[in-house]
Image (spheres, rainbow, N blue to C red):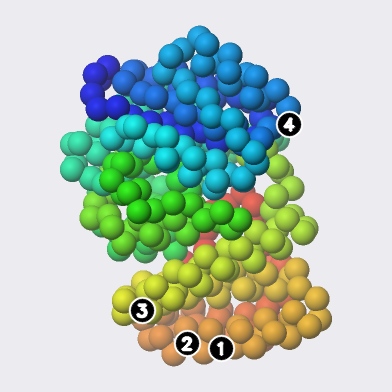
Amino acid sequence: MNEGLLASIIVPIYNVEKYLDECVQSLVSQSYQNIEILLIDDGAKDKSGEIADKWAEKDERVKVIHQGNQGISGARNTGLRKARGEYLFFVDSDDCVKENYVEELVSAMEKENADISMSRFVGLWKDGTKLVTSMPNHSMCMSSTEYLQNLYTFSGSCSVVWNKGYRRCLFDDIQFDIGKKNEDARLMLLLMKKVKKIAYIPSGLYLYRQRKSSIMNGENKSLLLQSELEWIQMHLDYLAEVNETKLYFTALKLYFNRNVEYYLYLDKVGKKAARKRLRKVGKQLVNKRDFSMGVRCKILFCIFFPQIYARYKNGGAEKRMDAYFD
């Protein structure tokens, strides 16, 4: 598929000189050639901006925008304003994609008349450990409700924006929140309010590099969990508003899980507040008869012994994508 509607690939760049060549090389080598590659230099302090400019000199499809540092959301928003394509893709500048990435995702959107297409991704930590995902091994389509259900249970969806293709019209009145962590999960909820169908293909077309091996440890893990609790709460507020009871309780279970995990990183005052929160949320879950007796017993155990259970379940958690009570 060398011809077709223009596809815009938005790449936010900040201090990635070590990885940028590999990323852009994978983009200019796409089998779907009617593309524009928007490299957004977000005030990089290394040679990333210079590397980007050299790519623009070599390939006319590469456009470089230099700007002061606004963070990844600000860089992506700049890309959205500049993009001319009917299809949109987001690729992080330290990652790369297979040569048929755009072609396969565009084809899936068109074949299924879908608003979004999504591929499996292959993750790799610096120590060579592969990311284990529970994404399906077969092609499928899902509604926005099914996508959110899978997102909350880690069974076929993920909140990141970078393993997906989008129809441009979805972003006519949507942009990324600047200054927020887990901005992808926030944005995906906004998109799901508009989306009717999502097409999934099982090929591992996106190559995700996990550079910061300590991101799931210590202070970074605490901040990550705090941010995750914020976006889950955002989803819960919306689901309650639209009376999506089943989805609400699925998301509430995830919220409870993450509060248990967050408990480990709190001080004495924080732990006291967390126990109150766990009791309040746990009571709602225990009274939900859709959950098995085993699940309700685990919830009760977590309410009374959160630190014990969190330590038990946290072993190796940075290399899993699962929920406690599935």
> Quick one: label 4 or label 2, which is nearer the N terminus?
4
How far apart marks 3 and 2 lie (CA) works out to 17 Å
Q: Position of residue 118 (x, y in %)?
A: 36, 42
Residue 65 lies left or right of residue 164; in this view the side is right
Position of residue 300 measured from the top left corner of the image (x, y, whole percent): 58, 85
Q: Distance between the Cα atoms at labels 4 and 1?
A: 47 Å
User: Toward which corner of the image does residue 297 lie, by quadrant?
Assistant: bottom right
In space, the residues marked 2 and 1 are separated at their CA atoms by: 7 Å
Mark 4 vs mark 2, foreground winner is: 4
The reply to whether discs 2 and 1 touch (Cβ–Cβ < 8 Å) is yes
Q: Earlier in the sequence, mark 4 or mark 1?
A: 4
Q: Tell me: residue 42, above or below residue 215.
A: above
Residue 280: mark in rendering: 1
Q: Which residue occupies the extreme top position in the image?
A: 58
Q: Secondary structure at mark 1?
A: helix
For label 4, the crowd category at 10 Å Cα-Cα, with few meaning under 14, some 14 to 19 and many 20 or more, is: few
Q: Position of residue 76 (x, y in %)?
A: 50, 42
Residue 12 quadrant: top right
